[in-house]
Image: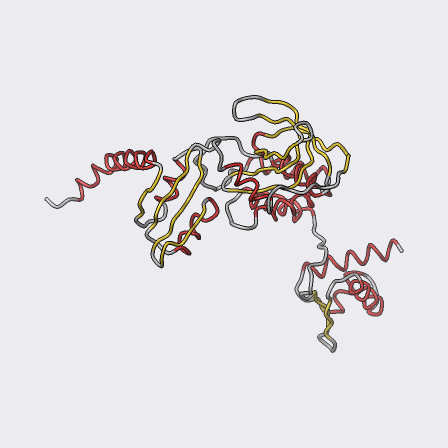
Amino acid sequence: MADTSARTLRLLTLLQSHRFWPGEELSGRLGVSARTLRRDVDRLRELGYPVEARRGVDGGYQLAAGAALPPLVIDDEEAVALAVGLQAAADGAVEGIAEASVRALAKVVQVMPARLRRRVDALRAVTVPATWRVDSGPRVDPDVLTAVALACRDTERLRFQYGTADGRAGERHTEPHHLVRLGRRWYLVAYDLTRQDWRTFRLDRLSSPVPTGARFLPRGLPADDAAEFVRAGLSGPSRQYRVEVLVDAPVAAVRQRIGPWAEIEEVDADRTRVLMNSDSLDWPAMAFGSLDVDFRIVSPPELGALMTAWGERFLRCAGPNRRAESPS
């Protein structure tokens, strides 16, 4: 039975590595007869893998698209690439995939051998992400991200160290509910067992997460979803600036460029209202400058002053070039 299981896994690996395998070549790779190969293929079909067979002289086998994605068999190199790629996707700004990337990353890391984890950590240490980051705050530790994701998935109570915005630090004992990615930051929505209330925790301020092994029955969240709960907390006095800008561009074009970091509202066919909560005006200034269209700042006035200062500095820097190119 052990030999049969090992051979079935080997067959699955081969089918996933090539689009089509001639039957004779596949039998030779596995060292079995054509009849045994057919039985192994039937076994994979019973497990949910859609294996198609082509009969005749040029017959063979291939994996087809099914109704659901079956488990994949990957080698060491692919496992390392998958973990690093998922971490990059989780840390990036592609709308809609960050949270799914963290869930997938948690599954991969959970079963990854220590030797492969060391390779992943080494690649992370020497890789510089090609992303725009105007803030100099600390980035989220990938190990923290995956540990918290697993605790959320397994409904397991979690202890961790947490530093607040005013510099206080201490241990928190929580029932983790959900991870939320908003803008450039990750947040944990959890029930704080010490304070007996729901809280939002920024992951870049969270360290040393320790699953306690104690499972819990999830409580009802006091919001329609976790993202709404986080947004409600961020709209309070802890955010320094509420930015409102009218952009002279259709809503689809604006959403494509800065949608992940802002609330986008259509004013008419050619104008869009953009709303942001930000603890720094540098990022909104860069975001609106990147749109390459005209816009009008509604609030706050500090954003207009910042852009004026930037514009004057840019003009000074470009001055010699403009004079050199002007007609004599």
State left or right for residue 269 relative to residue 229: left
Q: Nearer the viewer, residue 68 or 324?
A: 68
Q: Quick check: 166 above or below 47? A: above
Could you say which quadrant of the image residue 127 lies in? top right
Q: Quadrant of the C terminus?
A: top left
Q: Report x, y in % for residue 112.
A: 71, 42
Q: Nearer the viewer, residue 122 or 190?
A: 190
Q: Residue furthest right?
A: 1
Could you say which quadrant of the image residue 181 lies in? top right
State left or right for residue 317 relative to residue 324: right
Q: Quadrant of the N terminus?
A: bottom right
Q: Who's the residue at 65% across and 28% down the image?
A: 195
Q: Nearer the viewer, residue 322 or 300?
A: 300
Q: Residue furthest bottom?
A: 56
- Which color scheme does this rendered protein use? secondary structure
Q: Quick check: 33 above or below 218? A: below
Q: Who's the residue at 62% across and 29% down the image?
A: 207
Q: Residue furthest left?
A: 328
Could you say which quadrant of the image residue 230 lies in? top right
State left or right for residue 39 relative to residue 209: right
Number of marks in picture: 0
Q: Report x, y in % for residue 197.
A: 64, 33
Q: Report x, y in % for residue 90.
A: 57, 44
Q: Who's the residue at 37% across and 52% down the image?
A: 272
Q: Report x, y in % for residue 258.
A: 43, 47
State left or right for residue 33 relative to residue 249: right
